[in-house]
Amino acid sequence: MSCVNVSFEDGVLTATLNRPEKLNTFNPEMHAGLRAALERALEDAAVRAVLLTGAGRAFCAGQDLSERNTAPGAPPIDLSVSLGENYNPLVRRMRELPKPIVCAVNGVAAGAGASLALACDIVLAARSASFVQAFAKIGLIPDSGGTYFLPRLVGTARAMGLALLGERLSAEDAERWGLIWKAVDDEDLAGEAADLARALASGATRGYGLLKKALHASASNTLDAQLDLERDLQREAGFSEDYREGVAAFKEKRAPRFKGR
Ligand code: T3D
């Protein structure tokens, strides 16, 4: 059975982390499966939104620690190789994908699993789910974008507390703190996430891609640079078929029929 189940319907590519007995922890096969899913999402014009979720009781507990030999006498492990070859390209692929990624956090998201969720564009979480910055408990620092996402989403004080203490943050607190978009009742998660992904898949895909770029750039831009970027990206958006359709639909008082072009 594959580590990542991929399905496609109504413009939505759904990728389900599928090592439930291992809390969907990352191993090389999981990385390869996610890489392939994201490459397909990038290359296939029919894919207009991605939905990421996990099978079983966890979303993802980060790196599979059973794959790391830390026994006395074992050679030191150079973790920069794992980050450089797998985690960092994964996060870059997600951030650079010019299509929205919805995350349905079905259970605990720990370590790189929490960062994976935060690298998505809209995060819904089951009320019973939680977020754990587990890294410090094993002597590591938040990775896979954790030190970037956390302070930007919740501020330095809360990011520092979460990272140092490694305590569980409930989905409801995550919503209240602005870490995620929304906590929903467990039984509603799959349906709400699928509806959201479908709605995004019928939206103005090119505009979405450009707005992702603009919002992400704002984290490191001056206002001046950001205004220039908005001008340039809005130029591109204005050349899209979907812009014409959106304005025409508005004037004709009907729902737009976006084609994603
Ligand atoms: O190495 C590199 O490539 C560098 C990159 C690192 C990125 C990272 O993600 S580092 C962080 C790795 N993740 C963790 O440290 C999380 C460790 N797990 C936990 O903190 C907790 O298990 C959870 C908060 C995720 C869930 O807690 P709970 O109480 O719901 O479950 P549990 O009883 O702790 O775990 C259930 C089983 O899953 C248990 O095994 P057992 O006792 O039933 O045989 C536990 O050992 C196993 N498990 C949980 N997380 C991992 C894991 N096994 C391997 N790797 C894990 N990450």
Image (cartoon, grey):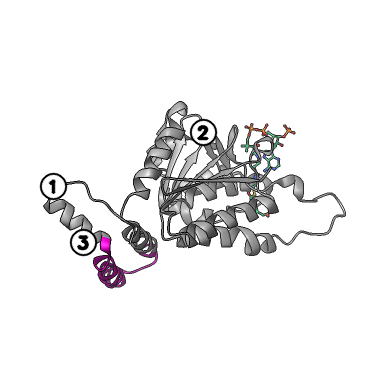
Q: Which residues are magenta?
A: 217-241
Q: Is residue 219 magenta?
A: yes
Residue beneath the point at 52% across and 35% down: 106
Disc 3 target residue:
244
- Residue 253 bears which disc, if any? 1
Q: CA distance from mark 2 to mark 1?
A: 41 Å
| Disc nearer the start of the sequence (2/1) | 2
Q: Is residue 143 visible?
A: no
Upstream in sequence: badge 1 or badge 3: 3
Quarter of the image that includes the N terminus: top right
Report the residue at 48% width, 40% height from top: 104
Q: Residues within 10 Å of mark 2 (few under 14, many from 20)?
A: many
The picture quadrant for ligand 1 comes to top right
Q: Secondary structure at mark 1?
A: loop
Q: Is residue 182 magenta?
A: no
Q: Quadrant of residue 31?
A: bottom right
Nearer the observer, 89 or 38: 38
- Residue 260 appears in the picture as rendered: yes
Amino acid on which the number 3 mark rests in the picture: Arg
In the rendered image, residue 60, in percent from the top left (x then y), is placed at 59, 42
Tell whether label 3 touches label 1 (CB within 8 Å). no
Residue 96 drawn above or below residue 65: below
* Mark 1 burial class by Cα count in 10 Å: few <14, some 14-19, many 20+: few
Which SS type dominates the magenta stretch? helix
Q: Position of residue 121 (x, y in %)?
A: 42, 51
Residue 78 shown left or right of residue 57 in the figure: right
* Residue kind at label 2, given as amino acid type: Ala
Residue under label 2? 129
Q: Which percent across, then down, holds residue 187? A: 46, 26
Beta carbon at label 2 within 8 Å of ligand 1: no
Precedes in sequence: disc 2 or disc 3: 2
Amino acid, disc 1? Lys
